[in-house]
């Protein structure tokens, strides 16, 4: 572990940086109780009184200070930094969409009421001033004494390069998310010196993360690293091939580098790529000129399993190792079952997802190392079943959205704009967090305004000049005209807007968005549903619906639950299970295809598909899952994409979807009300003998074991409904079993209780 | 002169940085002709052929390379830098409005067709890549060889701290304003590697200025300086008072500073301020700790005439001097006359304006050192009669506007938004430049949309929450309700929009803005014109026009020429010359008051007022003109403002308006068509015996001498109309005199001819 750091560790119990608001009396009592657990309860009264006194004199619970900034600005700045680290054969390779910037000038303030004078220490990123009760203090003080009583502290910061940020710590006064910030304080004075009333100024609550030490400057952020060695090295002439055993990511370190001349490191996700000095995607060229040995760490972290190091004869080094770079998130979900291949698929999915979870959820670690909304959308969902790390979801959403004005779709892709909206709805559903929506509703609105302004005369969206209609990587896929898939995502986005508007207190627009969604949904079915084909057709071109059927709109219609039972069965038989409908060759759309089938209870089929498809990659030696996998390809064909022999990413986040499928559709845990206040557990073995695992929730986790005759469940919070199919009346101690007919039974799962249900799997 | 620099000098003949586009054949012929004027015309044919060959082989006219960037971004970045240099008693004092940023990621490209291979050198501010014909070159090349033929060069740059900028120079390939730039190149590729057609990408022509050398990096910009000594120093104990003889601006330099302890420099625009260690507005505190002598230059330039240096006994220095910091603009206008006081007023105005003309037109050099739209508007007008420096006007307009989205009025002041629009119309009128409007029309539109969205139910503007309605510094001035002055500026802004829309090719909106302007003007007269008072009243509150009359709307209505003759006379008698209407105490509004009177032919009255008012400041020892001057105040009262004893700026750009009044209404030169294609000269001595001067135009200048019986005129371009009043038929050699009746005569002034007109002044 070197001295890079990434703020402090998160408090993963709550999945939030430690709260810094005054601890309410109740909580304090809890803390005191915990600390005093070795005492007998007779001491408690006296301890409570002591705690009360402490609170009264406000010198006890020194609150947690943290670096704060304008909400969203740090995320945008950090994403700029991250997305501009990609290289291709040594050439800088940045994104092709607009990058925004932080506001360079920021005002922070808070009013404090302190019982006694208090000296605060101040740390600032940028040029700044400090005002006490509106009066500027001379110079740039690093310590300020606040007199007793009620006082307002303003700190105004200018920083063009980094995000204006402050860290402030006194006995009771600290910088935290309760501070207010604005980029436009409008604090003008009139000719007599009177300050304006500032009524027109918009103040937001400060943004923060986990930079809880004054030395943990946000501008100096670095992910943590740990040293790793190659598992095998092969020397051949002036070339050394090092194999790190599996796909990995980090900084190559050359130990004892010395001499004069050139040295090139060719990186390879495959051995073939590392050995291809002409076509490998990434490399580092060093011009060495050092008389004595010294270690060298490469400047940029890279994705690889192999490195092929070719040095001039006069350049020598002792050995090669790497610093594995990772995001400090905590694994909270788990899955294990009777099938070893599925276990292996789960483990490799988990590792694939770990590699692609960085400052943000990125698409792939070799390429593009960017934040893509469609890719990130799947990462959010996987995250809810593995890390449940809210900050990474929020950061990713904010970075994708950027700032106004909207000049193009997110990542320039129309579908990716829609995934952004839907991702926010899911975030609310899984976490119950309304703060994010309240904070970013204005940016949701302006993006939706952009979309609405680009509808055609039918109120539908089609690719206009400058829009990329992506859908999926698939040969010959038409993007022309009104594509049904895009309308589905659009309608769902309008629903997300309706819900968000209401959360943000904008009922008028909430109703407007809901009406637009309803109208569009009805138009989708009247336009695309083909009774003969029992499916939604792919598109309408020049006013005429095509008779071409693709999987995309159909599978989304299933898990959006927009089809009636007959339609669902029609789609299942005529589309999803129909080999004549063009196959999907990316894990990206396999995600939704298998989700649709699982949502219809086809767990056994999906399990087989998963073993075939992901198992197919493992058979080919995959140590992480790929951007694309077409079983019909051979040998090095698997490595090629975009017309380049090693263009394909062999570690792509969207390859990790088994995490999500196994958690949501096998363990079967899913929220039914925001933040898991209520949720269902619908376990489905799909042919497995047994499975066990954990699904994280805002309350903690749901822990399960499921076999064909027994289910064990324990949950840390929320009201759960275990819904199971059984050939006989299930038996459970200490709980009621409700029969719902058709062999379906329900048991209510309460917080903290352990349930063991005996049943007979159908 | 130290090593600070400010790019290269401008070419002040054309008032544009040297053009870098290919010199068209016609121009080349002109150049050749001029160069060959000593040859006889028989040589011309052969020279023309030579020139033609040179052009054909494109190796002759090595074009001028210059640093380029996204248009407007550098101006915004530079204004952030400049506006965050203000301090107040050592405390950082930034603006209170939103500051925007440059786009951190930028793509530059151009297609070249070269006859032979060419190696270009490349200089970049930021992390970058180079693509040749769409293919990235490895690494970050600083030299690139372009093969013969047609090739596209793309350079993509990321820079968060500074503006992404490039400088590129080969034999014929150079970076210049013909390059195209975008912040969103949308250069995505499909799975086969095919690049998108980029049809939805907006490319703009690159922005540039005068950074014509690779070493003149835009990020390192500094105004030039020159050394100046104090005219008098007085030592008293550990204090030294240095008097620099007049108001100045720059960096204090302490020579041979040595010792250990504190040293404070108290700056003063007045001696009183410098001596007030407790209430002076600006200071520098040094903690000295150096065993041997070394010179020290202060970090920030400041405004002062006096500095009062107080040092601990153990701190010594040999002497104090300063580095005078100035903008490299050229004085092109001039005025001299038979009245010495007027000459003195003109000189001090010129110096006041010089001090406030910096990277941008600022309000005052001590305070606020910011770009204020209302102040800048007057500077533009003065500039047309002194420097005619277009780049400074453009930079100031762009910096004021910032970027979308619009979140408040410019500088938060409603009137200041309107001056911005009107300033653009004037810029077009004086310079004839349509490029600026074409480039920034989208930002004009979005700002006007903001204004339109804030109209009340009567279609008028009034101060909403967060709007500052300024008008002027004047005690008891009401800003409530629908203020007539604001509606006048609004209507004029709509007219400016109508003209600009047509220039930008947006005829539909041009008509819309014109209609809005017409409607509003008619509403202004039906609402505010009070027949009894023969004046526009100040405002309408709760639907009822007040019967309070102020000067503001009335004087603007005059020089907007929106009053009929009877109304004009009414306003003149009942408002402008009426001592019961509250007096104006700022040079800011005196500017317009005197302009209104001068526009009505009251030159004699205005001359007297000028001598009283500006002469009044001179009598009080002013060496530059002030932010406010109220003749009724006494002694140090003149130094106070904003409730602070030295709060007033003693060097404010708006104090320099005699430059404008004397050029426009005494020499009487003003454009009647954009860019002085046509113009009038209406000399008016206003009681002077004689006057002479120069008025700059895009063609060069108009040079004049005027006495009571003779007028001499010479002009470098455009069609001028000399309009004079004479008691007898004027006599002029080589030109026709047209009698217009009522003792008014006209003479057409052609380019390059010298005219001497004998007449008899009325």
Image: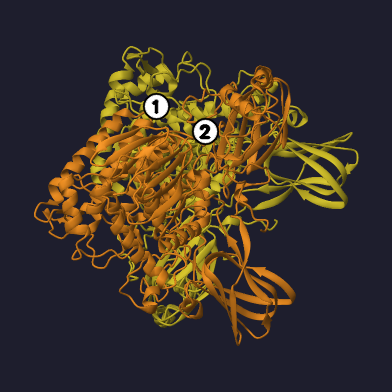
Chain colours: A yellow, B orange
In this view, B467 is above or below B644:
above
Query: In the structure shown, which secondary structural element does the residue marked by tag 2 occupy?
Result: strand
Q: Is residue B381 visible?
A: no
| Direction from residue A18 to residue B630 in the image, left or right | left
In this view, A528 is above or below B454:
above
In this view, A580 is above or below B702:
above
Question: Residue B578 lies in what quarter of the image?
Answer: bottom left
**Are marks 2 and 1 in one subunit?**
no
Instruction: Report if the CB atoms under discs 2 and 1 are less than 8 Å apart.
Output: no
Number of marks: 2
| Direction from residue A756 to residue A197 in the image, left or right | left
Marker disc for residue A486? 1
Residue at the left extreme of this rendering: B532
- Relative to the observer, which residue lies in front, A279 or B99? B99
- From the top left corner, tell me how far across and down residue B481 is, in percent: 19, 56
- From the top left corner, tell me how far across and down residue A367 is, in percent: 61, 34
- From the top left corner, tell me how far across and down residue A143 is, in percent: 53, 75
Could you tell me which residue is drawn at 41 percent across and 13 percent down?
A548
- Looking at the rendered image, the disc whose residue lies closer to the viewer, 2 or 1, is 2
Kindly identify which residue carries mark 2.
B205
Query: In the structure shown, which secondary structural element does the residue marked by tag 1 occupy?
Result: helix
- Relative to the observer, which residue lies in front, A591 or A311? A311
Could you tell me which residue is drawn at 13 percent across and 49 percent down?
B527
Quarter of the picture containing the N terminus of chain A is: bottom right
């Amino acid at each position: 572990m070197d001295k890079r750091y990434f703020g402090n560790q998160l408090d993963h119990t709550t999945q939030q940086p430690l709260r810094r608001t005054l601890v309410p009396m109740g909580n304090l009592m809890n803390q005191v109780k915990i600390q005093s657990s070795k005492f007998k309860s007779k001491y408690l009264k006296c301890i409570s009184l002591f705690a009360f006194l402490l609170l009264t004199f406000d010198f006890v619970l020194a609150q947690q200070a943290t670096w704060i900034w304008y909400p969203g600005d740090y995320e945008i700045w950090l994403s700029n930094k991250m997305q501009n680290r990609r290289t291709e054969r040594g050439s800088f390779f940045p994104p092709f969409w607009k990058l925004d910037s932080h506001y360079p000038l920021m005002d922070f303030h808070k009013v404090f009421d302190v019982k006694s004078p208090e000296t605060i220490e101040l740390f600032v990123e940028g040029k700044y001033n400090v005002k006490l009760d509106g009066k500027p203090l001379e110079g740039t003080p690093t310590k300020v004494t606040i007199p007793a009583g009620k006082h307002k502290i303003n700190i105004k910061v200018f920083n063009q390069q980094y995000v204006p940020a402050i860290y402030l710590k006194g006995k009771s006064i600290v910088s935290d998310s309760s501070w207010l910030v604005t980029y436009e304080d409008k604090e003008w004075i009139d000719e007599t010196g009177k300050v304006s009333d500032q009524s027109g100024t918009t103040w937001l609550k400060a943004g923060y993360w986990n930079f809880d030490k004054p030395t943990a400057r946000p501008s100096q952020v670095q992910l943590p690293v740990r040293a790793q060695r190659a598992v095998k090295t092969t020397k051949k002439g002036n070339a050394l091939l090092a194999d790190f055993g599996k796909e990995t990511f980090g900084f190559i370190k050359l130990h004892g580098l010395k001499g004069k001349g050139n040295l090139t490191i060719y990186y390879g996700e495959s051995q073939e790529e590392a050995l291809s000095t002409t076509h490998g995607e990434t490399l580092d060229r060093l011009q060495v000129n050092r008389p004595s040995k010294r270690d060298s760490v490469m400047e940029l972290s890279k994705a690889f399993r192999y490195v092929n190091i070719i040095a001039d004869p006069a350049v020598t080094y002792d050995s090669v190792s790497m610093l594995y770079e990772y995001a400090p998130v905590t694994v909270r979900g788990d899955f294990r079952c009777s099938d070893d291949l599925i276990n292996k698929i789960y483990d490799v999915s988990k590792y694939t997802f770990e590699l692609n979870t960085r400052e943000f959820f990125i698409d792939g670690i070799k390429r593009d190392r960017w934040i893509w909304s469609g890719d990130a959308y799947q990462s959010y969902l996987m995250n809810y079943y593995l890390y449940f790390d809210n900050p990474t979801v929020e950061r990713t959403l904010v970075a994708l959205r950027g700032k106004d004005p909207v000049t193009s779709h997110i990542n320039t892709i129309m579908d990716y704009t829609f995934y952004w909206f839907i991702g926010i709805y899911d975030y609310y559903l899984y976490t119950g967090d309304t703060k994010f929506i309240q904070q970013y509703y204005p940016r949701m609105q302006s993006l939706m305004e952009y979309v609405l302004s680009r509808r055609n005369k039918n109120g539908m969206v089609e690719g206009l000049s400058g829009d990329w209609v992506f859908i999926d990587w698939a040969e010959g896929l038409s993007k022309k005209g009104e594509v049904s898939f895009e309308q589905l995502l659009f309608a769902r986005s309008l629903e997300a807007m309706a819900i968000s508007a209401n959360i943000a207190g904008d009922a008028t627009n909430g109703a407007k968005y809901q009406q637009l969604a309803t109208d569009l949904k009805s138009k989708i079915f009247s336009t695309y549903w083909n009774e003969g084909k029992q499916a939604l057709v792919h598109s309408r071109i020049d006013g005429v619906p095509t008779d071409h059927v693709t999987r995309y709109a159909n599978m989304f219609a299933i898990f959006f639950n927009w089809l009636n039972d007959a339609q669902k069965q029609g789609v299942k038989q005529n589309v999803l299970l129909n080999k004549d409908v063009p196959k999907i060759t990316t894990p990206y759309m396999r995600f939704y295809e298998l989700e649709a089938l699982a949502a219809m209870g086809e767990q056994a089929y999906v399990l087989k598909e998963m073993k075939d498809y992901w198992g197919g990659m493992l058979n080919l030696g995959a140590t992480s899952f790929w951007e694309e996998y077409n079983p019909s390809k051979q040998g090095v064909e698997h490595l090629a994409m975009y017309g380049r022999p090693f263009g394909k990413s062999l570690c792509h986040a969207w390859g990790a979807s088994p995490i999500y499928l196994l958690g949501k559709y096998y363990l079967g845990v899913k929220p039914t009300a925001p933040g898991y206040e209520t949720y269902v557990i619908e376990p489905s073995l799909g042919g497995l003998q047994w499975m066990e695992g954990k699904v994280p929730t805002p309350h903690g986790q749901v822990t399960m074991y499921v076999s064909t005759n027994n289910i064990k469940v324990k949950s840390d919070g929320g009201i759960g409904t275990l819904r199971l199919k059984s050939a006989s009346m299930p038996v459970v101690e200490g709980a009621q079993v409700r029969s719902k007919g058709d062999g379906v039974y329900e048991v209510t799962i309460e917080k903290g209780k352990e349930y063991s249900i005996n049943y007979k799997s159908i």
